Image (cartoon, rainbow, N blue to C red):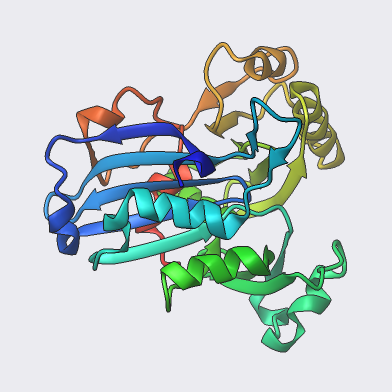
Amino acid sequence: MADHFTVGLNLLDNSFNAEDARNYGLAIFFSDTQCTFCILDGKRNKLIALHQMLKYDVQQINTLSSQKISYPDFLKGVLTSMPWLKSSFRQVKIAYEGKKSTLIPSSLFDPARLEDYLQFNFQPGKDEDVLADHLISMDSYQVFTIPVHIRQSILTHFPGSRIVLAASVLIESVWINYKNRINAPRVFLNLCATFFNLMIFDGRQMSYFNTFAFQNPEDVTYYLIFVLEQLNLNPETIPLIMLGNVERGDELVELLFKYVRHVEFGRRNEGYKYSYALNQLPPHVHSPLFNFFSCGL
C-alpha cells in the first residue's frame, strides 16, 4: 500500500492525539493526484496538523513495465496508513480541486439544469458527476464536475459527506479574510499544481473569476496580463495578492515583478491560532485549506 503514494508534507503538533478526534475538525482537499488535510483542535481553536500525500505510478526498477495506480487504491492506501482518519471527528469538510466550473447568479440558477450551465464552457463527460455549491457571500452558485471514480472513492470512505469545489472554498475564504480591506480593486492569484485560479474584486464584490491550466510561469503571466488588459485594469497600479503553491524568489514571482508593480502574499486568518509546526510555512501556502473551517460550505 505504501507504494501508492509518497508523503509531501507531515507537520504535526506534539499535542495531537488520534484518540481525541471527537474534539478535532478534519478538512481535506482531494485532487486527481494528491490528498492534503489539516486538523483543527476545536477546544483551543488551533490548527495543529498538515499532511500531504502525493499519488504516483511506480516504475518497476528491474523491468520495462510500470504500475498504474488507480485512485481507489491510492485513497485506500492513504487511509490504511492512517486509519485514524476515519475516526468520529467533530467535523469533516471535504473539497475537490478541479478545473471545470462556472458561476451562475442565484437569480438564474435552476438545479435541474446543472449540465446545461457547464456546456457554455465545457462538455461534461460520461465519467463525470456535476455538482453545485451555493456561495452565499457572492449570491451565486458554483457548478462543477468531479470524476465519478474519485467521488465514489471519497464517499466509500467518508459516507454521507458533502463534497464541494476547492475554488468555492477559495472564494469564500478570500471574502471572509479581505472583505473589510477590499475598498479598491484587488487581484488574487491562487496557484495549484497544474492550474491557477484568478479572482478580481472591484472594491465592493468579486467581479471576475476563472481557472486556467498552465505548464510554465510564462503561461501564468500571459493569462494574468491578458485578463487585466481585457478588463482595462492597469498592472502598474492594481495590487496582486498571491496564494497557494508559490514562494518568494520563485521563477514565477520574479517574472510577475516585471509586469505587475505591486505583488503581495496572502495573510493567515487571524481568527485561528497556529501550531509551531505550521509556522515554518509561509502564511499564504495552503491558505484555502486552512480557511475551510470558516466557510459556510
252 vs 69, nearest the viewer: 69
Going 70% across and 20% down the picture, which residue do you hit? 260
167 vs 226, nearest the viewer: 167
Question: Seen in the image, is 27 located left or right of residue 88?
Answer: right
**Which quarter of the image is occupied by the C terminus?**
bottom left
Q: Position of residue 173 (x, y in %)?
A: 46, 51
Question: Seen in the image, is 262 located left or right of residue 275?
Answer: right
Q: Position of residue 293 (x, y in %)?
A: 35, 57
Q: Position of residue 217 (x, y in %)?
A: 74, 23
Whether 257 is drawn above or below 33: the answer is above
260 vs 251, nearest the viewer: 251
Q: Outermost residue toward the front?
A: 62
283 vs 12, nearest the viewer: 12
How many marks are shown on the rendered structure?
0
Going 43% across and 54% down the picture, which residue do you hit? 28
Q: Outermost residue toward the bottom?
A: 112
Whether 194 is drawn above or below 173: the answer is above
Query: Quadrant of residue 79 in the image?
Result: bottom left
Question: Seen in the image, is 277 located left or right of residue 178?
Answer: left
Q: Is residue 139 visible?
A: no
Whether 47 is drawn above or below 18: the answer is above
Q: Position of residue 194 (x, y in %)?
A: 69, 38
Going 69% across and 51% down the picture, which residue do you hit? 209
Q: Is residue 248 visible?
A: yes
Query: Quadrant of residue 222 in the image?
Result: top right
Query: Quadrant of residue 27 in the image?
Result: bottom left
Going 85% across and 34% down the picture, which residue do you hit? 226
